[in-house]
Image (cartoon, rainbow, N blue to C red):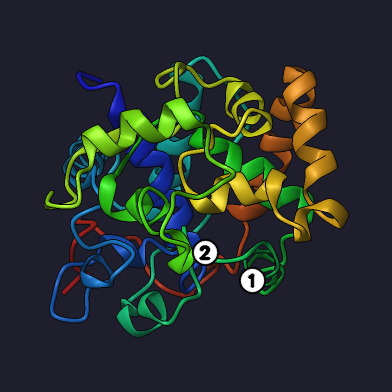
């Protein structure tokens, strides 16, 4: 992997695929109805060419055996491992979907950086995941970057207050205001895990305790009123115990990778991840 950020991008592809239509690699399909064109993915989902490279190598070795959905799951595991995180045995046998679902990808089934804790929890529950899974999988933000567009609302006039988000560390506010001025196009990027951007660790949770979560949806897991009875105690536990975070992350991502998979004679094994077989 030539680019450190790619690990986070591949992990995100697996997540964004599974929450829409289940883990069926529908996100990889090109075309006018492509999920790549949905708001949560447009100009932000990336790493498709890496999946193509893996798929070509696999097809050359054993054609028609390994699905694109399984490749996404294994690429996510290897991305975590190569970033210093845990490894796990990936359950295999998923098949690839025959249709993309841009409508669902646009319909807010994916958790948004602007959602409340309760809304995020409800979106996880809708696909069979629980509150612990919310916090564990949010810990994937221990690697990767985010564009100004998704966190700049916190920097100047947060929720119409005329001031920055009061839960955001003041030094971080100053840094981010310089990076993302009101006149910017929103395309500059900042690390999701300040001071530990490329290492898969529990530093992300330590940041939340110090008001240094980049996205609103990160910081509210600790700071919001809703968090008091739901996510805050889990954030505190993970911030204190890296092994506990790792074991819970593994459990949660295996559960996530098992959302409505196509098996048996359903779907197909695509030869090219971008198009259904002719």
Q: Nearer the viewer, residue 129 or 184?
A: 184
Question: Which label's residue is closer to the chain start, 2 or 1?
Answer: 2
Q: Which image quadrant: the C terminus?
A: bottom left
20 with respect to 261 (left or right): left
**Image quarter (top left, top right, bottom left or bottom right) of the N terminus:** top left
Q: Where is residue 95 drawn, in percent x and y?
A: 45, 62
Q: Specify whether residue 137 is in view.
A: yes
With respect to residue 99, does 72 lie above or below? above
Q: Circle 1 is placed at which residue position? A: 119
Task: Report helix, strand or loop for mark 2.
Answer: loop
Specify few, some or many for label 1: CA neighbours under 10 Å numbering under 14, 14-19, or 20 or more.
few
Q: Quadrant of residue 87?
A: top right
Q: Residue at x 22, y 34 (%)?
A: 179
Residue at which label 2 appears: 111
| Separation (CA) of disc 2 from disc 1 | 8 Å
In the rendered image, the vertical position of residue 93 relative to residue 145, given as above or below: below
Residue at 47% x, 74% y is 21
């Amino acid at each position: 992997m030539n680019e450190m950020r790619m690990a986070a991008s591949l992990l995100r592809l697996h997540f964004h695929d599974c929450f829409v239509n289940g883990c069926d690699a529908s996100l990889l399909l090109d075309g006018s109805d492509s999920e790549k064109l949905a708001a949560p993915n447009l100009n932000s989902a990336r790493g498709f060419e890496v999946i193509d490279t893996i798929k070509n190598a696999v097809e050359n070795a054993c054609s028609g055996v390994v699905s694109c959905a399984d490749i996404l799951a294994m690429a996510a595991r290897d991305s975590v491992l190569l970033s210093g995180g845990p490894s796990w045995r990936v359950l295999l046998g998923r098949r690839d979907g025959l249709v993309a679902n841009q409508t669902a990808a646009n319909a807010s089934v994916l958790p948004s950086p602007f959602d409340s804790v309760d809304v995020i929890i409800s979106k996880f529950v809708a696909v069979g995941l629980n509150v612990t899974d919310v916090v564990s999988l949010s810990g994937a933000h221990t690697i990767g970057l985010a564009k100004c567009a998704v966190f700049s609302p916190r920097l100047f006039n947060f929720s119409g207050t005329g001031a920055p988000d009061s839960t955001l560390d003041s030094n971080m506010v100053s840094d981010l205001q310089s990076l993302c001025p009101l006149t910017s196009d929103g395309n500059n990027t900042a690390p999701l895990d300040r001071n530990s951007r490329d290492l898969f660790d529990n530093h992300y949770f330590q940041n939340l305790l110090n008001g240094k979560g980049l996205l609103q949806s990160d910081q509210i897991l600790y700071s919001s009123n809703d968090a008091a009875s739901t996510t805050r105690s889990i954030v505190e536990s993970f911030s204190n115990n890296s092994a506990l975070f790792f074991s819970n992350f593994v459990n949660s991502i295996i559960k996530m990778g098992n959302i409505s998979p196509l098996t048996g004679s359903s779907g197909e094994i695509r030869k090219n991840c971008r198009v259904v077989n002719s």
